[in-house]
Image: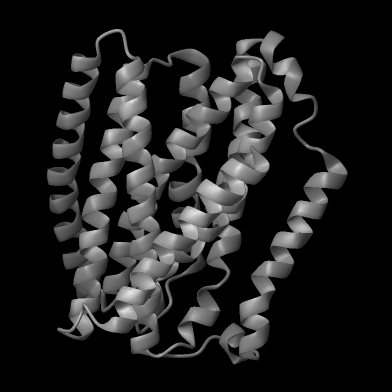
Amino acid sequence: MRESPYEQLPRSVLFLGPFIVLGAAIALLAITSPLGDLEAIETATTGEVLGTMVLIGLIVGIIPVVIGMLWFPFMRTLDHSKLHIVLALSAGVLAFVGVEMTEEAIEYAAAAPSPSLAAGLAIVGFIGTLLLMVGVSRWSLARAQQSGNRGLGVAYLVALGLGLHSLGEGIAIGSSLLLGEAALATLLIVGFILDNVTEGPTVVAAVARDAEAPPLLHFAALGVIAGGPVVLGGWIAAVAFSPVMAAALLAVGIGAIAQVIWQVVDLIKFDTPQVLTRANMSGFVGGFVFMFLLDEVFIDMILL
């Protein structure tokens, strides 16, 4: 691995730097209040709602993911065995996201006028996406292997899976605002910011093992794919939301995440046949438990 100028900095700086950036970003949001009065959204025009959701998507989706991706230089300093632990941790994060999306899809399907129709569309969406992602992953990984950057293809698949999760976040925020629950929407915004920061390292973990770091344009694209769909989710909530649509879209995301977890396992296998080591399993469980504590304990019990 060829070192970049950033990787020549002390590892403590590379590790702590994103925390400092996150703190500065939160302080800036608190001082400037760029979202203004969210309670006014209930009586705003459609154009104003769509514009607000663009700003929310930037603050909740793209910026936090990019901040989390700033741990990439630190991850580049790790050897393969430690990177495998990071990849396993990423798989644990993805597994929790998949479980969370499954719960949400079931809730939306149950609330639909025709639960059987919603469930059927969700199953078709899950299976169809899983099969589609298999084909896309084989094609993208084949191209990536030719350049020696196999991890970049996996990173795009991870970003796509998390992007579909971000779609659900946008639906939740947009629905809360349009129902007049501005306080709930504010808490969701705070919670999703923290959630998406933790997903940033998950996106770039696979790239950290590649011989060459990709151009910055790829990092920008990964951030938009993973966090940008918050905007689309908010638009859907504002214009054409239905429980059936929400259940189907979430099922699509579940299928994508299931395939991505498989690709992460394959990426570890590319370096070593021993995937289910104690260290890797600890990383997987650690990622799942961390997200559980963040989402179910800190966000749900403390913030909400």
Left or right: 12 as drawn, with respect to 234: right
| Closest to the observer, 83 or 6 | 83
Res. 203 visible in picture = no
Relative height, residue 151 to residue 27 (above, below): below
Q: Is residue 159 visible?
A: yes
Q: Residue 205's spot in the image, x, y percent?
A: 41, 71
Q: Residue at x 24, y 77 (%)?
A: 268
* Frontmost residue, 2 versus 27: 27
Horizontal placement of 103 versus 199: left or right?
left
Asked whether 184 or 216 is in front, the reply is 184
x, y percent for residue 224: 49, 48
Asked if 50 appears above or below 155 in the picture, the reply is above
Quarter of image, res 304: top right
In screen coordinates, is 123 left or right of 224?
left
Residue 247 position (above or below residue 58): above
Residue at x 85% of width, y 42% of height = 32
Q: Residue furthest right?
A: 31
Task: Please tell me in which quadrant of the rendered image residue 204 appears.
Answer: bottom left
Q: Position of residue 236 (x, y in %)?
A: 46, 22
The count of marks equals: 0
Q: Residue at x 57, y 57 (%)?
A: 197
Q: Is residue 210 above or below residue 300?
A: below
Whole-percent x, y for residue 175 in the image: 54, 21
Q: Nearest the camera: 265 or 48?
A: 265
The quarter of the picture where the N terminus appears is bottom left
